[in-house]
Amino acid sequence: MTVKPLAIAAVLASISAFAAEAGQIERACLSSGRPGVTRGLCGCIQHAADITLTRGDQSRAAGFFRDPHRAQVVRQSDRRSDEEFWRRYQLFGDTAAAYCS
C-alpha cells in the first residue's frame, strides 16, 4: 500500500516541475479556456515569446490573455514606453503566427 502514496508524490512532483518550467505566456495561454488550446500550441507561443519579449514584457502580455481590453489600452496609449512595448508585442505576435501555425 505504500506504492500509492509514492506514485501520487511522483505525479505531483512532475506536475510541479512542469508548472515551474512553463513560462508566463504558456501558463496564461493554457488557462485562457479558449477553443483549440493545447500544450503544444501554448508551448510554441511561449517559445516565440522567449525569442522576442523580455520577462517583463511577457508578464505584461500574459495579462492580455485574462483581460484583452488591456491590450487595446496599451495599443492606443501615447506613452513612448507603451509604443515601444507594442512594437515588441507585434513582433511577438507575428513570430508566433509564423512559427506556430
Image (cartoon, rainbow, N blue to C red):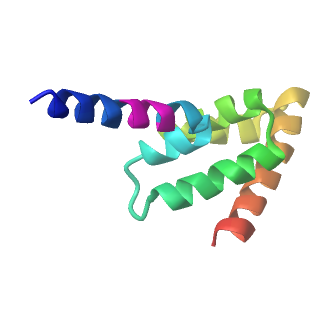
Q: Quadrant of the C terminus?
A: bottom right
Q: Which residue: 42% across, 37% down? A: 14
**Above or below for 91 versus 99:** above
Residue 6, by quadrant, is top left
| Residue 14 is covered by the magenta coloring | yes
Q: Is residue 41 left or right of residue 80?
A: left
Q: Which residue: 89% across, 37% down? A: 84
Residue 36, by quadrant, is bottom left
User: Which residue appears farthest toward the left when viewing the image?
Assistant: 1
Q: Which residue: 51% across, 39% down? A: 27
Nearer to the camera, 41 or 67:
41
Q: Quadrant of the N terminus?
A: top left
**Residues shaded magenta:** 13-18
Tell me where residue 91 appears, x and y as whole percent: 82, 54
**Above or below for 14 versus 45:** above
Tell me where residue 21 appears, x and y as whole percent: 58, 36
Tell me where residue 20 appears, x and y as whole percent: 54, 30
Q: Is residue 79 visible?
A: no
